[in-house]
Amino acid sequence: MVTSALQRELKRGSAEILILALLEEQERHGYEIGRLIDERSDGTITFHVTSLYPTLYRLEDKGLIEGRWVEKGHLRQGSGAQAGTRRRRMYRLTPGGRGVLAKQRSVWDTFVTALDRVARIRHA
């Protein structure tokens, strides 16, 4: 029981940095962000739509990311989809988001280093 509560808190506390880091690489839509978090964490961290999208909207409200609607046919050249068939909200990192990401990375790095010193938790 304690472990699952800890996992929930860690997930909640890391959501912003995970999203900002993925958007630092390139513009993405919400489904892709969720899929990449799941994939890159080997399924350890997953976000259901009910928690991922409110986090994206909150980051957008804070000015850390910007979203824009794009027709599915315009997402990638040669996708075979007809323009106008489906819209997706594409998100990108703002300059303010880059600054927050850098600060969050520093905080997490310090925290993980301290955990390792105290509890001998090895990190990659």
Image (cartoon, rainbow, N blue to C red):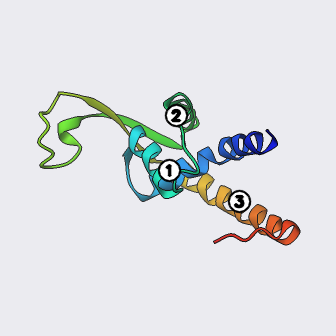
> What residue is pinned by disc 2?
48
- The three-letter amino acid code for the residue at tag 3 is Trp
Mark 1 / mark 3, whichever is N-terminal: 1
User: Residue 24 at what x, y percent from top left?
Assistant: 47, 56
Q: Are marks 1 and 2 in contact (CB under 8 Å)?
A: no
Mark 3 residue element: helix
Q: Which mark is residue 37?
A: 1
Q: Are marks 1 and 3 in contact (CB under 8 Å)?
A: no
Mark 2 / mark 3, whichever is N-terminal: 2
In this view, 54 is above or below 122: above
Packing grade of label 3 (10 A; few <14, some 14-19, many >=20) is few
Structural distance between the alpha carbons of marks 1 and 3: 17 Å
- The three-letter amino acid code for the residue at tag 1 is Ile
Q: Quadrant of the N terminus?
A: top right
> What residue is pinned by disc 3?
108
Residue visible at 51% across and 36% down in the picture: 56
Residue visible at 70% across and 40% down in the picture: 8
